[in-house]
Each structure stands twice: as structure tokens, then as C-alpha cells.
Image (tube, helix red, strand yellow):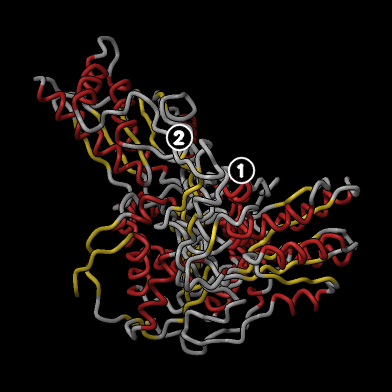
């Protein structure tokens, strides 16, 4: 074993490899992406033996692929972020009824905040809906242990198992012992065995539902009694040990780590003042579904009040309220529902310590005043005024900027609805581009545009979709447009990567994680095969060409498509920065107000022959990619490419 500093997602990958996983598949999505990339890296290095790893076309394809492998008896791992589970939900709901043979773990990363997602969806709720057990780590180390335990649990009960870390667990780093090599477990002799149970029918589903219900009861008992899982639901006591505890603190996920830190800090502050905290009992719930009812009942015995800390939904709070009702416990449960815990976003040690101070204080507000005094003197102090917000923006040189600008120019003054999608290009909604009117979920822009076209046929309707999303979830909407003859224009922003989640490959690149270079799936070929008759092409950084291509497609009656092709700036070497001719600049600001590139600023104090005292544009050479779009936008030829530039 070698000790290495690993990101949480890397540790999860190593844990799965050590558990003998044979097939790993998923779809990229922050904060989950690094797990599959780590497996692929170790496979390419010859460290992970016998494993197959891939980015699938979407989450549904990935889950169905690993299900087939699991039927053969192989240990399998599926990965996605919380909203990706929505795409895979059809397969998951049935997979639980059919059951699995090889250990089947679903690594689903939740994103409180949300930091990089369209929703604060809580996978623990989804697990309950699908009746699939879920493990919820509070640290990367615990997560790695849960990953190994999840494979064992899956095979014990023939069920998929979800491991649900959140963003901070996925991206935190710590040291792990890493083996020199790993080997996938052998598939049981005979492989896939034909059996009627693999075919889902209504009668079999009815029987399976009863089996699932019993399985959940058995797993809940295991979570309360089996030492393999009891370790994930630890109970400790603190405060005044001479008293019988009447206060209880329950936390799950990374909130358990925050709560432990807050309790320790609050206890230290009290001792410095010659006081002690009231006696309390703390429970971490690392197995939220099925809820470890018996363990929680033992924890709650003798307590009069419990406060709950968890991120996203009030899952643990609900379960404790249910427990109090069914077991007739005289305990008050406080948390999100009572306003005693944050009802959205991420928790923090700073927030929890103040809430605990209020929880322990009953009359004199001693602990609250103690915490306020400490935070005033410490690094926990908040700035008196809110810091300015820096809005997200497309990168300098991003080809999507040219695509949006060309479409807006081609539309002119025509009334239009511009439907966006999930990816970097959602940022096209910001001023001055103002080119995204809607964004719902992956692929929805194409289909929503058709709804707008039905109700408002007098307008033009344009849908933007990235090249990766085109393959992941755009095809169904395009087929629907052709089949029903909807008058929309699909604008494919082909930058040759899945940029927003870390530049992963997709079917249009031909690159696979197993090292094979396949023939790229042609976006144009797919569109023609579906039946799109009008397809235009352009480099979005060639403004005249891009505008002409956009106008031709938009003017076409019926389904049409524009394919804008230019690589993501992360994939290419930047050209030399453009420069401003100060004698020619008039200070009109069109380069800023038209395209909004972050590499272009304005110096209000600059003067020139034509700008007088209006100020002049300036270029931040450390940001400029040399794309040349601003050169084409400037009406006075005051911006020029550097010598050696390609544009």
C-alpha cells in the first residue's frame, strides 16, 4: 500500500476497485465526474485489471448497461449527479423489482447550494420513492468504507444500493492507503442464467413488491443491529456527564462533521468560562433509508428535545417525527420544519454552532452570548457588508459567444423565443447577449421550442443544445419535431467536448475511456437520418459566415438545424491577444455592449484623437484568447489581431 492524497471521488473509485468492481458506467455531472475518470486513469496505467469503464450516452444507458452486467453476476458501479438519476429513473424503478445478482452500487452525488446544478434535489427522497437502500457519508474516509459495504449489502439482498455523497465530500481531500494494483472479481461460473425472474410482468411485479417491503424491514434491522452497518450510525454523549441527557443532536452526511466540530468548539468555549454544556447525546445517521428505527429509538430514550441537522430535505426529521408518533415518545423534534435549522443550501460549522447555542439556552442566553463574543474575535467573523457578487460568464474566447451573437443578428427585430439547455451555454442568458429565454433540463430546450411554436406560430423559435447534450437527450426532441413538422431551428453548439463538467469525451468525439478511438458519430449524419432537411454549418468565430448560416436555417419553414463548430478554449492553444488602436477607438463601447467578453474592459480616463474624453476600450491580455470576435464587431476597425494570430 502507498499513502496518497486523494479527492473524495478518487477515494470512492479506489474503494470500488478494491471491492472488485468489473463494470463502471455513468454520465458526467459535477460533483460526481472524477470517480469514473479515476477508474479510467488506473485502467490506462495498467493498475486496475479486468475492469470496463465508460462514459455512456446518458444516465439511462449507463444504468441499463450495468444492470445487464449485474445479471451475469459481475460487480458494477453506476455514477451520476442528483438530476442524472431522473434520467435513469425508469430503469431504476423496475430494476429494484427485478433484482440483481452481482453487487450493484449507484453512486449519486447531491449538490446542496446548488453549486453547479439546476435543483437541490435530495437523493435520499428518491431512494425512498424507489425503495432502494441509501448510505450517506460524512467524510471521504467513511464514504470509501460505505462503498465497500454497499457491494456486500447489494449482494446480500439482491438489490441496487445508493451511495449518496454531497459536493463537499466528493471534493474534499485526505490521505488514503492505495494498493499497487486491483483486480475485478471473477464472474460466477456460467455467467447469465436464464430465469423468468429477469422478465418483468405485472404478476411478478406484485410478488416482488411484497419482497421489497420485507427486504426494507430486514435492511432496517441490519442498519440497527449488524456491526457492518451500525458503525455508520454512531452514538456518543457529551456535556455534563453527571446529568442524564435530555438534549439530543442528530445529523447526517457532511452536516454530522459540522455538528461534531460545532459541539467541540462550543464545549471548549464553555469550559474556558468555567461552565459545561448540558448533557447531550449525539447520533450520526449514515444509513438514512431504510431508517434504522430501533437504533434511533434507543438513542431517543429519555430525551426531551432533539435537533436535526441535514442538507437539502428534512428526511431524518421526518423519520424521527414518525418514530416519536409510532413509539409514543415524549420528545420534541426540531429542525427544518420548525425553523431551527437551515431550510436550504449548505450547512456550516458557523451556522450550526449558533443554532446549537440557541438549542441549549433556555433562559439566560449564556451560550448565545458566548458564541457571539467568540465570532466577533475570531476568523468566523463575517464582513459587515455583503461582498459584491461576481456573476458567472462565458470564458473569454468561448465560441458559444459568437454563436449566440450570430443568431441574434440573424433574427434582427423579429420576435423570437430562444430556448436554452444545460451546459456552459446556459450563460448565454446574461446581458448583453440575452440569448437564452428558458432552461429547464437536459434536452428540454428542443422540445419546449415546439410547444412555443404551436401556441405562438407567428414567432421564430430557436433551441440551443451542446454537442454532448445532443447525444445525451436531444435526439428524441428532434425526432418529435420532424415527425410533427414543428417550425423550429435547433442550434448545435459543437465545441468537441462535454465542457461544463470537465471536458469529458462523448459519442461525437469517438474517444472512449477504454483507450479505443472509435469513428465519431456524426451530428450531421444523425440529423439527416432523422429527416432534418435544412442543415447549415459555420465557424461561430467567423461572424459573417455564422450570421449567414443562422439566417438560412431560421428562414426555413419547418425543422432546421445550424451546426456551429469551434473547439472549446480548453482544448486549444490560445492565439496572441488582440490590441486596441488608441488612435482609432471612439469610446463607443460597442465591443463591450454587444458581446460582453470578460477580456475587454473600459478605461474612463483614457483619451484619444477620436474618443476625446469619453474613455477607451482596453484588452486584458492575460484573459484574451485571440478569438477575433471583437475585431469583427468593432465598427471603426479599432481592434486588430496581433501578428501571428490565426483570425
Above or below residue 218? Residue 531 is below
**Would you say 606 lies left or right of 637 here?**
left
Q: Is residue 213 visible?
A: no
Q: What residue does disc 1 label?
A: 431
Q: Quadrant of residue 497?
A: bottom right
Q: Residue at x 62, y 65 (%)?
A: 541
Residue found farthest to the front: 609
Q: Residue at x 24, y 27 (%)?
A: 245
Asked if the residues shown at circle 1 and circle 2 are in contact, with their CB atoms under 8 angstroms apart, the answer is no
Q: Residue at x 36, y 39 (%)?
A: 251
Above or below residue 629? Residue 255 is above
Q: Marks 1 and 2: which is nearer the front?
A: 1
SS type, badge 2: helix
Residue found farthest to the bottom: 190
SS type, badge 1: loop
Q: What residue does disc 2 label?
A: 317
Above or below residue 127? Residue 353 is above
Residue in front for this viewpoint, 149 or 410: 410
Q: 10 Å neighbourhood of mark 2: few (<14), some, or many (≥20)?
A: many
Residue in front for this viewpoint, 578 or 131: 578
Q: Is residue 225 visible?
A: yes
Give the percent coordinates (x, y) of residue 469.
Answer: 63, 64
Q: 10 Å neighbourhood of mark 1: few (<14), some, or many (≥20)?
A: few
Above or below residue 570? Residue 141 is above
Amino acid at each position: 500500500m502507498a499513502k496518497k492524497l486523494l479527492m473524495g471521488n478518487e477515494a470512492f473509485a479506489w474503494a470500488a476497485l478494491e471491492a472488485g468492481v468489473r463494470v463502471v458506467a455513468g454520465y458526467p455531472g459535477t460533483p460526481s465526474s472524477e470517480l469514473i475518470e479515476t477508474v479510467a486513469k488506473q485502467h490506462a496505467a495498467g493498475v486496475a485489471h479486468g475492469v470496463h469503464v465508460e462514459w455512456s450516452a446518458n444516465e439511462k444507458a449507463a444504468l441499463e448497461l450495468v444492470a445487464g452486467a449485474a445479471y451475469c453476476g459481475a460487480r458494477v458501479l453506476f455514477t451520476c449527479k442528483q438530476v442524472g438519476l431522473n434520467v435513469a429513473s425508469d430503469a431504476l424503478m423496475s430494476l429494484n423489482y427485478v433484482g440483481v445478482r452481482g453487487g450493484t452500487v449507484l453512486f449519486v452525488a447531491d449538490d446542496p447550494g446548488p453549486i453547479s446544478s439546476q435543483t437541490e434535489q435530495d437523493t435520499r427522497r428518491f431512494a425512498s420513492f424507489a425503495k432502494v437502500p441509501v448510505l450517506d457519508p460524512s467524510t471521504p474516509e467513511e464514504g470509501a468504507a460505505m462503498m465497500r459495504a454497499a457491494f456486500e449489502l447489494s449482494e446480500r439482498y439482491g438489490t441496487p444500493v445508493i451511495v449518496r455523497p454531497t459536493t463537499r465530500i466528493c471534493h474534499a481531500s485526505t490521505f488514503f492507503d492505495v494498493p499497487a494494483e486491483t483486480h475485478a472479481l471473477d464472474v460466477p461460473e456460467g455467467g447469465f442464467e436464464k430465469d423468468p425472474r429477469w422478465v418483468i410482468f405485472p404478476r411478478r411485479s406484485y410478488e416482488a413488491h411484497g419482497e421489497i417491503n420485507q427486504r426494507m424491514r430486514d435492511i432496517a434491522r441490519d442498519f440497527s443491529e449488524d456491526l457492518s452497518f451500525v458503525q455508520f450510525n454512531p452514538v456518543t454523549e457529551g456535556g455534563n456527564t453527571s446529568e442524564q441527557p435530555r438534549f439530543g443532536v442528530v445529523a447526517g452526511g457532511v452536516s454530522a462533521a459540522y455538528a461534531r466540530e460545532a459541539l467541540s468548539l462550543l464545549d471548549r468555549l464553555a469550559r474556558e468560562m468555567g461552565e459545561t454544556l448540558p448533557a447531550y447525546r449525539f447520533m450520526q445517521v449514515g444509513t438514512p433509508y431504510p431508517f434504522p428505527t430501533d437504533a434511533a429509538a434507543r438513542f431517543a430514550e429519555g430525551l426531551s428535545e432533539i435537533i436535526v441537522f441535514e442538507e437539502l430535505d428534512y428526511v431524518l426529521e421526518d423519520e424521527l417525527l414518525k418514530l416519536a408518533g409510532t413509539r409514543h415518545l415524549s420528545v420534541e423534534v426540531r429542525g427544518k420544519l420548525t425553523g431551527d435549522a437551515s431550510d436550504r443550501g449548505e450547512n456550516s460549522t458557523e451556522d450550526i454552532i449558533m443554532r446549537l447555542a440557541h438549542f441549549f439556552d433556555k433562559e439566560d442566553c449564556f451560550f448565545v452570548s458566548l458564541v457571539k463574543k467568540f465570532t466577533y474575535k475570531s476568523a468566523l467573523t463575517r464582513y459587515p457588508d455583503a461582498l459584491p457578487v461576481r456573476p458567472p460568464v462565458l470564458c473569454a474566447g468561448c465560441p458559444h459567444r459568437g454563436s449566440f451573437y450570430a443568431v441574434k443578428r440573424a433574427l434582427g427585430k423579429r420576435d423570437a423565443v430562444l430556448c436554452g439547455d444545460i451546459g456552459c451555454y446556459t450563460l448565454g442568458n446574461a446581458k448583453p447577449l440575452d440569448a437564452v429565454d428558458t432552461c429547464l433540463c437536459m434536452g428540454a430546450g428542443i422540445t419546449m421550442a415546439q410547444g412555443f411554436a404551436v401556441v405562438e406560430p407567428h414567432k421564430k423559435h430557436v433551441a440551443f443544445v451542446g454537442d454532448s447534450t445532443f447525444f445525451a437527450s436531444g435526439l428524441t426532441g428532434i425526432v418529435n419535431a420532424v415527425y410533427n413538422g414543428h417550425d423550429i431551428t435547433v442550434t448545435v453548439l459543437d465545441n468537441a467536448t462535454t465542457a461544463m463538467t470537465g471536458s469529458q469525451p462523448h459519442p461525437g468525439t469517438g474517444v472512449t475511456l477504454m483507450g479505443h478511438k472509435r469513428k465519431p458519430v456524426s451530428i450531421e449524419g444523425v440529423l439527416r437520418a432523422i429527416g432534418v432537411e435544412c442543415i447549415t454549418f459555420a465557424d461561430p468565430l467567423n461572424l459573417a459566415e455564422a450570421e449567414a448560416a443562422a439566417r438560412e436555417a431560421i428562414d426555413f419553414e419547418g425543422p432546421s438545424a445550424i451546426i456551429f463548430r469551434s473547439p472549446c478554449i480548453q482544448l486549444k492553444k490560445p492565439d496572441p491577444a488582440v490590441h486596441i488602436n488608441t488612435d482609432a477607438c471612439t469610446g463607443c463601447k460597442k465591443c463591450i455592449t454587444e458581446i460582453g467578453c470578460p477580456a475587454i474592459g473600459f478605461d474612463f480616463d483614457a483619451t484619444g484623437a477620436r474618443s476625446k474624453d469619453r474613455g477607451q476600450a482596453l484588452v486584458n491580455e492575460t484573459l484574451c484568447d485571440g478569438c477575433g470576435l471583437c475585431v469583427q464587431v468593432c465598427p471603426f476597425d479599432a481592434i486588430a489581431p496581433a501578428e501571428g494570430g490565426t483570425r
